[in-house]
């Protein structure tokens, strides 16, 4: 009888794990399995979609040393870094500024939160198509507006120029994502006791001192989360580039990123067939880059903020 009671107690204790099983199965099928297969495929040669022979690290050597693959890779890699650094300015800094304003005693804060978050609810394809129309060099709303207010010298073929195409795509991506970043920062600000800010004002601290000495240190966890998400998003970006510039990252690969390069290798036509092995090598390199950078970001934030 005692053994039966103990068995029932242990069964109830571990019953909760059964409820995690469906989520674990879905995660394994759609996340772990593709990741493992990509890692394995990067060490094989392919004939179309058929795996042929084990070739070791030849796919990686081809990617880094043979033309034109190495040129495409490093070109796309540099664009991902540009994407990240510009996004930090156009998304993180702007969303932090908006969160601070909305957190203050401003009227209609709920309305502004809804309006800034609204683009996040729209389809990426819809946003990409709409901004392709807005940025059209001949009939686009932006150039028409500049012409109308006497700034025709600033008109550009925004998506057709190698100098402006990548920054235009980054701007659209940042515009659509600012609302989400702002809500993360707002959640961090609302977790801070207002008495801390009140005490700082009573002690004579000016707005700059409050921002640098109180607000930013208190937002350490939010800044860490958003830094990681922005880095991952910048290196995994695909939808906006594909929707606005196509898989080749035009014009002349000026908006090409690692994911579009991977797409062309794995699903395009390279040397008469799909270069799945090379595409998988790109995916593995991208995974390693994101993993290392994410670990470094977490380490820096935890060392500088959370260990105090």
Image (cartoon, grey):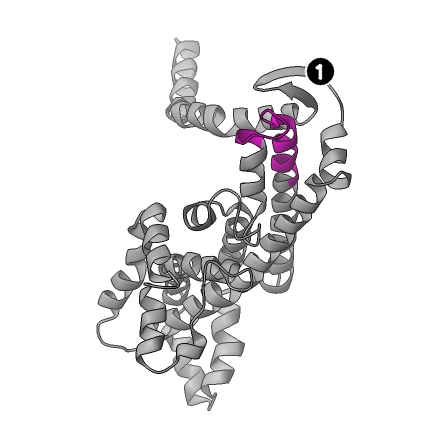
Q: Magenta residues, as a range?
A: 266-285
The percent coordinates of residue 154 (x first, y second) are: 44, 76
* Crowd class of label 1 (few under 14; some 14 to 19; many from 20; radius 10 Å): few
Q: Is 236 or 239 nearer to us in this picture?
A: 239
Q: Is 296 or 12 nearer to us in this picture?
A: 296
The image quarter containing residue 56 is top right
* Left or right for 285, reference 184: right
Q: Is 294 or 214 nearer to us in this picture?
A: 294
Most prominent secondary structure in the magenta stretch? helix
Residue at the spot 43% in from the left edge and 76% down from the top edge? 196
Question: Is residue 131 depicted above or below 261 in this figure?
Answer: below
Residue at the spot 55% in from the left edge and 53% down from the top edge? 231
Q: Is 106 or 248 nearer to us in this picture?
A: 248
> Could you tell me which quadrant the C terminus lies in?
bottom right
Which residue is identified by label 1?
A: 53
Looking at the rendered structure, the secondary structure element under dot 1 is: strand
* Left or right for 108, reference 289: left
Residue at the spot 28% in from the left edge and 78% down from the top edge? 105
Residue at the spot 48% in from the left edge and 45% down from the top edge? 238
The percent coordinates of residue 36 (x first, y second) are: 59, 25
Question: Is residue 172 depicted above or below 198 in this figure?
Answer: above
The percent coordinates of residue 280 (x first, y second) are: 62, 31
Q: Is residue 221 visible?
A: no
> Could you tell me which quadrant the N terminus lies in?
top left
* Left or right for 258, reference 20: right
Q: Is residue 94 visible?
A: yes
Number of marks in picture:
1
Question: Is residue 219 depicted above or below 26 in this figure?
Answer: below
The percent coordinates of residue 304 (x first, y second) are: 63, 64
As drawn, which residue projects farthest toward the top? 1
As drawn, which residue projects farthest toward the bottom? 204
């Amino acid at each position: 009888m005692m053994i039966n009671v103990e068995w029932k107690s242990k069964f109830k204790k571990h019953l909760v794990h059964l409820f995690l099983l469906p989520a674990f199965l879905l995660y394994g099928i759609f996340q772990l399995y593709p990741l493992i297969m990509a890692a394995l495929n990067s060490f094989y040669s392919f004939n179309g979609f058929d795996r042929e022979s084990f070739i070791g690290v030849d796919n990686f050597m081809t990617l880094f040393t043979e033309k034109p693959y190495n040129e495409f890779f490093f070109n796309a890699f540099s664009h991902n870094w540009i994407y990240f650094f510009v996004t930090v300015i156009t998304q993180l800094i702007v969303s932090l500024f908006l969160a601070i304003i909305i957190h203050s005693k401003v009227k209609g804060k709920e309305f502004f939160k809804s309006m800034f978050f609204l683009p996040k609810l729209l389809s990426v394809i819809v946003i990409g198509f709409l901004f392709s129309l807005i940025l059209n060099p001949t009939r686009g709303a932006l150039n028409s507006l500049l012409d109308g207010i006497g700034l025709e010298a600033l008109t550009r073929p925004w998506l057709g120029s190698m100098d402006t195409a990548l920054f235009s795509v980054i701007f659209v991506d940042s515009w659509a994502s600012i609302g989400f970043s702002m809500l993360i920062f707002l959640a961090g600000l609302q977790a801070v006791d207002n008495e801390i800010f009140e005490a700082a004002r009573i002690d004579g601290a000016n707005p700059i001192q409050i921002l640098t000495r109180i607000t930013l240190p208190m937002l350490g966890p939010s800044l860490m989360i958003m830094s990681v998400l922005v880095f991952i998003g910048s290196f995994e970006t695909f939808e906006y580039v594909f929707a606005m510039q196509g898989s080749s990252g035009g014009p002349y690969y000026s908006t090409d990123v690692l994911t579009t390069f991977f797409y062309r290798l794995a699903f395009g036509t390279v040397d008469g067939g799909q270069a799945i092995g090379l595409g998988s090598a790109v995916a593995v390199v991208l995974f390693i880059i994101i993993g290392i950078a994410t670990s470094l970001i977490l380490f820096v934030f935890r060392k500088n903020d959370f260990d105090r």
